[in-house]
Image (tube, coloured by chain):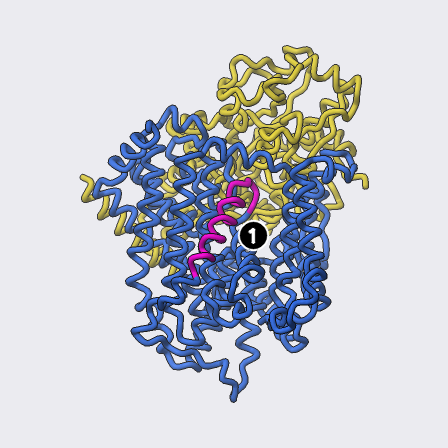
Chain colours: A blue, B yellow
Amino acid sequence: MDTLNELIGGFAAAMTWQNLIFAFLGCLLGTIIGVLPGIGPVAGVALLIPLTMNLDATGAIIMLCAIFYGTAYGGTITSVLLNTPGEAASAITTIDGYAMTKIGKAGAALTIAAVGSFVGGTIATVGLVAAAKPLGEMGLLVGPPEFFALMVVGISLLVALAGKSMVKAVMSGALGLLISMVGIDPVAGAPRFTFGSDNLLDGVSFVAVIVGVFGLSEILSYRKDSATSVVHAPGLRSLLPNRSEWRRSAPSMARGTGIGFGLGLIPGMTGSVSSLLAYVAEKKFSKHRNELGHGAIEGVAGPETANNAHANAALIPLFTLGIPASPTIAVLMGAFLQQGLVPGPTLFTEHSEVAWAIIASLFIGNLLLLLLNVPLVGLWTSILRVPAPILTALILLFMVIGAYTINFNVFDVFVMIGFGLLGLALRYLDIPLAPMVLTLVLGPLMERSLRESLEISQGDFGVFLNRPIAAVLIGVGVLIVLSPLLKLRKPKALIEDPET
Amino acid sequence: MPRTRIAATAFAAAALIALTACGSNAGVSGSAGGDFPKKGKSIELIVSFSSGGAVDTAARLVQPILEKELGTNVEVVNKPGAGGQIGYTQLTSAKPDGYTIGATGSPSVVVSPLDPARGAKYTRSSFQPLGRQVIDPTVIAVQPDSPYKTLKELLDAAKAKPKSMTASTTGLQTGEHFALAQIQEDTGAEFAPVHFSEGASQATTAFLGRHVDILVANVSDVTDLSKQGKARVLGVMSAERAPSLPDVPTFKESGYDLEAGTVRGYSAPAGLPDAVAKKLEAALQKAIEDPAVVQKMKDLGLQTSYMSAADYAKFWAGQEEDFKKVLPMVQKKD
């Protein structure tokens, strides 16, 4: 009850008209910044921090949280409409989001993405209010060995992405792991596969790779006579999802919330892991899994919900332990610090009013984003009325600028083009692209946790088997890998699943 | 009043968007006396670590005052990665005209060129130190229910059974790793280091989850944890007790003459014209010693410890000598 009272107090503090305007401005600016190519939530929030410097603490944090939501949604808009993800976490949305755009359902995809973000974010925030402390402590149970075991489960899900040929999927996955190795060895500090180039010291930029592999290679594969190159502008009626799309989205949103919330609690997990695994979960469990890759609403609803649930759940370790669980949260934490607020449990004892006002503003921010963006869907999708040849050129331009603005480095543009060619080659060889993206995201996290685990155990691999959580997770991973063998008798039609 | 604030915010927002769009910095007013900095030409402050960290926060705190002092825009740019090496490479390869400066932290900036395996393209002489801002001493902490109540008990136990306890670092050859090496060399107490290359927050998480036994960190990382009773800090590796941890004895008080810590300051690429260097140094001193900045740093558990450009350069050279001695102990052997 106390909690409820304090939350109501928080709403009272947050709902002054100035704060609402700050929240609104933040959502709007964030969305615009997010739509600009290459600027994801981390850069977006960092860029707009100076705006909030002169506000009081509550107003500043409210505005920043709103900016944070806005940038995340802005990245989704470009993923769906232009096949160019603004940030890593919405990369996987491009697969079905852009496919929906091509069949004239861009409006539905954007609306569902906004609703999914709202649902995931709001449920995660309820979790923050109801059980922040135990949830925060639960996240601590995941040490490096458990983290590694979780990554094993993630990688094992590759079998769900296999499509026609398991061998090709494994090849694609191995390629992703190889690419994830490029750069300075995170532990020993020695450069790997950098060929003496400074530009490769930090590895290849994930967003540049994604834009190249999915976006550019798709454009390159257009042929003059090909029907795939035509993008249909949606009519007014298709701006909103139809009833069946709503119904199909609900279970995906539920799964996405679960995945995003659970992974968000774990410090060190990134939002892109959540959205990727949510997509893979759709691929494995959705009733319409065969349509995924061809413009299925589940492929948008799941990852987008997971992404936002993750982002909000990641605030739990920040509030309970003072630990920034992801890079974006770290930026937010920086802003807290500049306002003289030290995030952590002491925030609730020393600045309780501000803490609750921030939590209330998370709810408000989520709602505002929904209210702001659903009416704007029509505006965003009208870009598709641009004639196809010009639009394609525009998308190309967007991709180049997007790759450049990641680090303001021309090298990333070449990375993008190189991976576009690689993606094209893989398409011709009929090798699925999604497994590569999965391992590219999970690879570095897996490597890091493996090495930390072995340092903890001083070289003993038993550390993964004599810790119960880790052992169970490894077991799950093994089962998933073996599952196609158990399903061999299934009708062929169900297994066949052409991947993009 | 609120209305003007909102109007100002809206205006700033519009201006910012315009800036993002065209990448220029028109309309910045200033009182530039002399040639540097040219009106409207902004200065880039490279932070070689990600945003939100201690280095970044400190840089963003001094930034507004630097702008005021220099009369032009100062943009904090994060170039994280490879333990600072990427940003440092960028800083040292910039033109020494004063329009690019950077935050430099040791041991990272001192050590990365010493180890040939890292292939750094800069050395100490590639930097022109401008001023030191802060010293963040290393601390050693155990779990709150640990049987070890004093530093001596802990180190004796680690000496009796080497590598029986794991200790966190924020990566190979970081301040924490060097501190462990110094402890080992001086006292014979050996811990098994676990390198959390993602940084202090990952190390702290693992400690809180009891996945590592000992937390080796900076004063600023443990101030809050110690207040909450989640970590028992046994010793500070500085000459005097840390103001934010008044009850924790220094290593010297416990009988070990050891000091270690992270040191942060600002530098430019070597070869600045004298007048420019003077101007930057003076502005930085103003910003670092600004009472509001000092107070905010203190809130974070960071003690401001300003040093002029010349002293910082001398200090840097001294650190290089110290680190060279223990370097073989922190190099990856496998």
Q: Nearer the viewer, residue B318 or B324?
A: B324
Rendering coords of residue A439 (x, y %):
64, 57
Q: Quadrant of the N terminus of chain B?
A: top left
**Where residue B324 sits: x, y (%)?**
74, 32
Could you tell me the amino acid type at mark 1?
Answer: Val
* Residue at numbered disc 1: A273
Q: Main secondary structure of the magenta part?
A: helix
Q: Is residue B35 visible?
A: no
The chain letter under disc 1 is A
Q: Is residue B331 visible?
A: yes
A385 vs B226, left or right, is left
Residue found at the far bottom of this picture:
A225
Q: Which residue lies at the image location 73% right of the left edge and 35% below the top edge?
A: A466
Residue found at x 28% / y 34%:
A8
Residue A266 magenta = yes
> Which of the pair A274/B167 is nearer the observer?
A274
Q: Residue at x 42, y 38 (%)?
A: A128
Residue visible at 59% across and 37% down in the picture: B202
Whether A127 is drawn above or below A412: the answer is above
Relative height, residue A59 to residue B257 (above, below): below
Q: Nearer the viewer, residue B198 or A400?
A: B198
Q: Name the residue at the right extreme.
A: B334
Q: Position of residue B82 (x, y in %)?
A: 63, 46
Q: Position of residue B302 (x, y in %)?
A: 49, 27
The answer to whether residue B116 is above or below residue B152 is below
Relative placement, left or right, of B147 versus A265 is right
Give the magenta range: A249-269
